[in-house]
Image: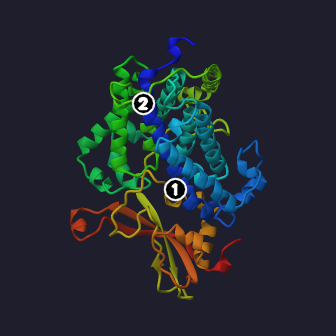
Amino acid sequence: MGSWFWAPEYAQAREVCTRLAGLVYLLGFAAAVHQFRPLAGEHGLTPAPRFLRAVGFRRSPSLFHLHYSDRAFGAVAWTGVLLGLAAVLGVVAALPLWAWMLVWLVLWALYLSIVNIGQVWYGFGWESLLLEAGFLVIFLGPAHTAPPAPVLWLLCWLLFRVEFGAGLIKLRGDSCWRDLTALHHHHETQPMPGPLSRFFHRLPGPLHKAEVLANHGTQLVVPFALFAPQPIADVAAVLVVLTQCWLLLSGNFAWLNLVTIALACSAMDDRLLRFPAPEMRDSPLWHQVLVLALAAGMLVIARHPVRNMLGRHQVMNRSFNRLHLGGTYGAFGSVTRTRYEVVVEGTPDRSGESGWREYEFPGKPGDPRRRPPQVAPYHLRLGWLLWFVAISPGYGRGWMPALLRGLLRGDRGIRRLLRHDPFPDEPPVLVRARLYRYRFADRAERRAGRWWSREPAGDLLPPMSAADLPG
């Protein structure tokens, strides 16, 4: 291959990018260890075995079509945790090229197997983003080989789609992005606010408008500069990283920001990322052929996201194939103006007239006196889905009855997903789900110890016993 194929000046970029990718895999598999089985395991809210019986391998490629059990799932998830940790620590970077590719291929295949049977719990854009980024990392090569430029270009192309797609969907979607008022609401109504979200929400209106303008610039203009000569590409990558850090501070968006930062680092050359790199050599011909085949294949499927971005009816976070490659991304094409929360309660009183106690979930707002926690880059799937249910109850039609049934049984798996179970000794006899309108506390309320102010907004589900629930 000619000198154009190699990019030794991006060796440090590859090192940072791959270690961050390993960290995100580690987080993804760790979340699966803790959450998947109560959500989608054999006795979960949406059981994976039932899903596997209903769909074939072609519709949902997964190793679990060979066999699923909670024990087998645990082995897969813990394998992913260990391999992700090895990537973070740099152990994988010291392996021979073939072993490097095998480890990253196994990580990708195992996580793909989980995502494709995860159903509604894995329907988030950052799942596909991790899979696509992780697939490209397979071909980057270990530390003792020169980074192949085509793979770095593909990583930048992925970052371009993430940023530019998100910018377009905002302009085409909600009018508040066009009149610069989106952040008058977003910090308060986002899915899972963080410790500083109230501070960001209370910033002056003109500063909110400046934030929106900066967001438009970063997502609609800066991505084109990623393909410019250095040092322009370095500047563009730094602007993306700074924006993502701002988002990390202002809310909890799982590992979306971390993956985006990893992709941005792939555009930074050694003038920005300066630390010692081992002596490198060109990779063998078979690897070069694989890289060119990868580039050709990604070029072919690029027509789908390009057509989506240029089309009049752009969609967000859509995968055009079951391998989650060449997808389209974006977020918050619409911004909710009012925050509603689902509050689940139980009572030991069979009449349902008294004794109602609230269940607390780890990340979502509940107790008005509790400060919003820092969750990201970890992902609390049940809390996110409950935010969607508060917007439209139809999101919970397939699993809310099972959640309430699990609480009535005192199911151990469901209880592990809670922050606080008000019935530690004996489960309740009735449960219900209520809607509350939440807003950030004003100064006087904050001085009284509250982070939120809330008022009832109606019943989502009336009091129910186990006999009232289907299934």
The residue labelled by disc 2 is 13
Residue at 47%, 81% in the rendered image: 356
Q: 10 Å neighbourhood of mark 2: few (<14), some, or many (≥20)? A: many
Kindly check if marks 1 and 2 are in contact, taking CB atoms under 8 A apart as contact.
no
Residue 90 in the image, given as x and y percentages of width and height: 47, 41
Q: Is residue 129 above or below residue 232?
A: below
Residue 374 in the image, given as x and y percentages of width and height: 37, 57
The residue labelled by disc 1 is 388
- Label 2, secondary structure: give it: helix
The amino acid type, in three-letter code, at marker 2 is Ala
Front one among 175 and 366: 366
**Residue 172 appearing in the image:** no
Residue at 62%, 74% in the rendered image: 405
- Hey, which residue is sitting farthest top in the picture? 2
Residue at 66%, 77% in the rendered image: 468
Quadrant of the drawing holding the N terminus: top right
Residue at 49%, 54% in the rendered image: 379
Residue 76 in the image, given as x and y percentages of width and height: 64, 53
Front one among 333 and 328: 328
Ranked by sequence position, the earlier of labels 1 and 2 is 2
The amino acid type, in three-letter code, at marker 1 is Phe
Q: In the picture provided, is 263 more to the left or to the right than 410?
A: left
Locate residue 408: give its quadrant: bottom right
- Label 1, secondary structure: give it: helix
| Cα separation between marks 1 and 2 | 37 Å
